[in-house]
Image (cartoon, coloured by chain):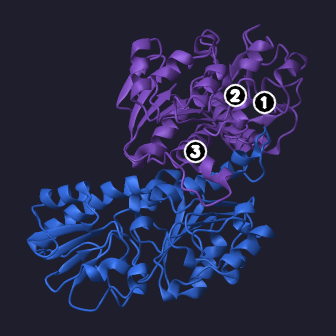
Chain colours: A purple, B blue
Amino acid sequence: MKIHVGPVRAPELEEAVLDAGGELSTLREASALVWYGAGPERFGDFHHSGIEWVQIPSAGIEPWLAAGALGGDETLFTSAAGAYAETVAEHALALMLAGTRQLHTIARAGSWQRPEGIRTLLGATVGIIGAGGIGRSLIRLLEPFGVRVLAVNRSGRQVAGAQRTIRADDSEGIGELLGACDHVVIAAPATTSTDKLIAATELERMQPHAWLVNIARGSLVDTEALVAALAEGRIAGAALDVTDPEPLPDGHPLFGEPRALISPHSANPQHLLLPALARRVHTNVARYLAGEPLEGVVDLSAGY
Amino acid sequence: MKIHVGPVRAPELEEAVLDAGGELSTLREASALVWYGAGPERFGDFHHSGIEWVQIPSAGIEPWLAAGALGGDETLFTSAAGAYAETVAEHALALMLAGTRQLHTIARAGSWQRPEGIRTLLGATVGIIGAGGIGRSLIRLLEPFGVRVLAVNRSGRQVAGAQRTIRADDSEGIGELLGACDHVVIAAPATTSTDKLIAATELERMQPHAWLVNIARGSLVDTEALVAALAEGRIAGAALDVTDPEPLPDGHPLFGEPRALISPHSANPQHLLLPALARRVHTNVARYLAGEPLEGVVDLSAGY
C-alpha cells in the first residue's frame, strides 16, 4: 500500500509507515494519507479520489467537522482518539494531585504559609465523565490510591475498574455522581450533546471541597458559570487544560482566580505527541495491510 | 495496661487505645504514654519511673534527640516512622508530577503560555534515596507509570519493586544512580550520616532535565549548593516539602527561584496525621498487650 505523509514531513511517522510494512509515496500515487503539520482547511487541496483512508493526527475532530473536510465521499477517516490517552491521563492525575495538595496555592505564595484545604486522593471518590481511552488510562493510574471511580459513558456499559457506570443520558444518575465526587474529571469528546455539559446546575451539585478537572475540550464547561462558582467558593477549585475561549485571553478572570489552575492545553505537547502518533500510525498501517479494523475510526453520526 | 494520652487530649487517639483493648488512665497511674500536642522539651515533666513505653507522634525523632529526651533509662520509645508513609508518598508523587508537567510554572504564569520542559513520568527512571516505608508506598503509587526505580537503603537489601538497590555507603553506586535518574526523591531519615547528603558534587551528577524532590528533612540537602544549581539551570527543578532552614524565611532565594516549588512541610498535615497516628497507636497498643514487637521502635544507635 502506498502512503503519503504530509503536507509537512515527519520522519517519525514515515518510519512508522515503513516499519509496519507500508510503502511511502508521493501524494498523487498514494491510496492512504497520514495527515500531519497543517489544519483541515488545507485538506481539500490534498485529498483526491485515489485516497481510501486518511489518518488524522488529533484525537478530536471538531476542526475537521467545522471545515467540512469529512464525509464528502467514501474515504475512511481515523482520528488519533485514544492514542494520547496515557500522557493525557498522567496530566489529569497531575492536576488532580496539585488541587488535592494545594500546589497551585503554594506555587504562588512566595512564602512559608500552610494553605487551607489540603486533602488526600487516597480513598477519594473520582467521577470520570466520558470514560473512554483517557478514562481507562486514568483508572489504571488511580488504582493504587484505592479510589472509588464513578464513570459516565454513552452506552452505560460497565467500565472496568469503575464502581458504577452511568449512561450519559441519565441526568439523575449524573446529578448523584456530581454530589458524591471529590474530583470530577471531564474526558468526553466535544459534541453538540456535550456542549456546556457542566454548567451552573451541575456545579451546584458538586461538594464544596470538590475539584473540577477538564482535560477534554473547553466547550464542555460553561466558563461563566465556573467563574462564578469559583469566585463564590462553591467548589474548591478547577484545574483546566482546555478552556472556552481557547487560548484564554490575558486578563481573563480564571487567570486571577486563586482556586483555578490553568494549563495551556499542554496535556499532550508536541514532543510527547509524535511518538504516540507514530505508534498509532504503525498500528493502523499494519491493520490496514492485514484487512483488520482500524483504531479510532471516525463515526460521523456520533461526531467523533 | 493503663495508658495516658497527653499532654494535650486527642479523642481519636484515646479511642484507638480503647479499641485496641487498652485502658485510659491518669499520667500518674499510666505504664505507657502516648505523647501528643507538645514538643519533647516538656517531656521530662511528664515522664516517670512507671512508664515502660512512650509512643512519639512524629516520624522523625531529631527534636527528641536534641532535647535529650531519649535513652536516659530503660523506657521503650516508638516513633510514628512509616505511619504517614502513604500520605507523604502521595505528596511526593504530586510534587514529581508537578515538576514533570511544569505546573509550578503555569500556576505562576497568569497567561496562556506553553512552558518549556514538559516531560512524562511514564517510563522514567526514579531514584529513591532512603527506601523505607515512604519509599515502598511511593513505589506502589508509581507502579502503573512503568518507571524504573533505583533504590538506596542502609542495608543494600533488595527493595521490592526496585530495579536495583544500592547500599547507602556505596558512594560510587549512588553517583551512578544520580546520573541515571529523571527524578531523585529523598526519603531518608535525618541522621549525622545523611547530613547534606545532596551537596554540590551530587547535584553535578544529576541530569539537566532531572528533578530533586525532598519529602524527608531539610538537612539532607545543602541549600546553598541547591540554590546555585537551580540558578545556573544545572538541574530542571527542585520540589521541597522540607527545607534548611525551616521554615524558609521570607525573601529566601528559593522562593524567587522559577525552578523551585516549596511546599511548607505540608506532606502530612495535622488533619491527615491524626487518623494515621490513631491507626499506629491502635496497632502498637494491641501489640503491646499481646507481647508482640512494636512498630517504629527507636534505634538510638542508628539515630531514628
For the C terminus of chain B, give its image quadrant: bottom left
Crowd rating for badge 2 (residues with CA inside 10 Å; few <14, some 14–19, many 20+): many
- Residue B256 pos. (x, y %): 75, 61
Contact, CB < 8 Å: mark 3 with mark 2?
A: no
Marks 3 and 2 sit apart, C-alpha to C-alpha, by 19 Å
- Residue B281 pos. (x, y %): 23, 64
Contact, CB < 8 Å: mark 2 with mark 1?
A: yes
Marks 1 and 3 sit apart, C-alpha to C-alpha, by 22 Å
Crowd rating for badge 3 (residues with CA inside 10 Å; few <14, some 14–19, many 20+): many
Q: Amino acid at mark 3?
A: Glu
Q: Earlier in the sequence, mark 3 or mark 2?
A: 3
Q: Is residue B5 above or below residue B12?
A: below
- Residue A219 pos. (x, y %): 66, 20
Q: Is residue A42 above or below residue B260?
A: above
Marks 2 and 1 sit apart, C-alpha to C-alpha, by 7 Å
Nearer-the-camera pick, B120 or B69:
B69
Image-quadrant location for residue A249: top right
Q: To which residue does mark 2 refer?
A: A243
Q: To which residue does mark 1 refer?
A: A247
Is residue A156 in sight in this rendering?
A: no
- Residue A209 pos. (x, y %): 46, 36
For the N terminus of chain B, give its image quadrant: bottom left
Callout 2 secondary element: loop
Is residue A231 in sight in this rendering?
A: yes
Q: Earlier in the sequence, mark 1 or mark 3?
A: 3
Q: To which residue does mark 3 refer?
A: A90
**Which label sits on residue B159?**
none
Crowd rating for badge 1 (residues with CA inside 10 Å; few <14, some 14–19, many 20+): some
Image-quadrant location for residue A288: top right
